[in-house]
Image (cartoon, grey):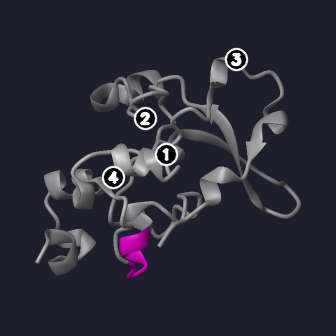
Amino acid sequence: MAFWQSKTLTEMTSQEWESLCDGCGKCCLNKLIDDETEELYYTNAACLLLDHQTTSCQHYSDRFRYVPQCTVITAQNVHELTWLPDSCAYRRLAAGRALPSWHPLLTGSKDAMHLAGMSIQGKVVDERRVKDIEDHIVLWPLKDLD
């Protein structure tokens, strides 16, 4: 039985925890919250550290030096991070759901995730090039498969 099936999120080692991240990049998108309705909107404006092709952070280990507001996702706060997409492995496991069929832990690479359209690859712009963030609201990050 795989570790994510036999352990709770809090029982996982840091290496196991980190490996749960599929690397889709959706958490690195700028998001908006409507002041009146508190509705969450994703944009296609990506963090300046996000590599748009590999969908990985270019400075993951020291990202807080560049982006102090970057959020650390932990077993303790994952339930509070309602802005994580439904497809996020952390969110799925915290809710008692299985990893999706395209997840790199199941497939061995990010290729299936990219082919399934579950990553930011080919869909984003650098946040530094965005003038009016409202013009960049998108729905595709909300997509969830199996």
Image height of 142 relative to 123, above or below? below
Please, what is the three-letter code of the amino acid marked with disc 2? Thr
Distance from disc 2 to disc 4, alpha carbons, whole Å, reads 12 Å
Task: Please name the residue shown 59% across and 58% down the image.
Answer: 83
Q: Which residue is mark 4?
A: 21
Disc 3 and disc 2 in contact, CB within 8 angstroms: no
Disc 1 and disc 2 in contact, CB within 8 angstroms: yes
Q: Point out the frontmost of discs 3 and 1.
A: 1
First reached walking from the N terminus: tag 3 or tag 1: 1
- Count residues near mark 3 (Cα–Cα under 10 Å), then give few for <14, some for 14-19, many for 20+: few
First reached walking from the N terminus: tag 1 or tag 2: 2
Q: Which residue is mark 3?
A: 129
Tell me residue 43's x, y (percent): 70, 41
Q: Which mark is residue 119?
A: 1
Frontmost residue, 17 versus 123 = 123
Q: Is residue 96 magenta?
A: yes
Q: Which mark is residue 55?
A: 2
Tell me residue 99's x, y (percent): 34, 69
Frontmost residue, 37 versus 135 = 135
Q: Point out the frontmost of discs 3 and 2.
A: 2
Disc 3 and disc 1 in contact, CB within 8 angstroms: no
Task: Please name the residue shown 27% across and 30% down the image.
Answer: 61
Region rendered in magenta? 92-97
Per the image, label 3 sits on a secondary structure element best described as helix
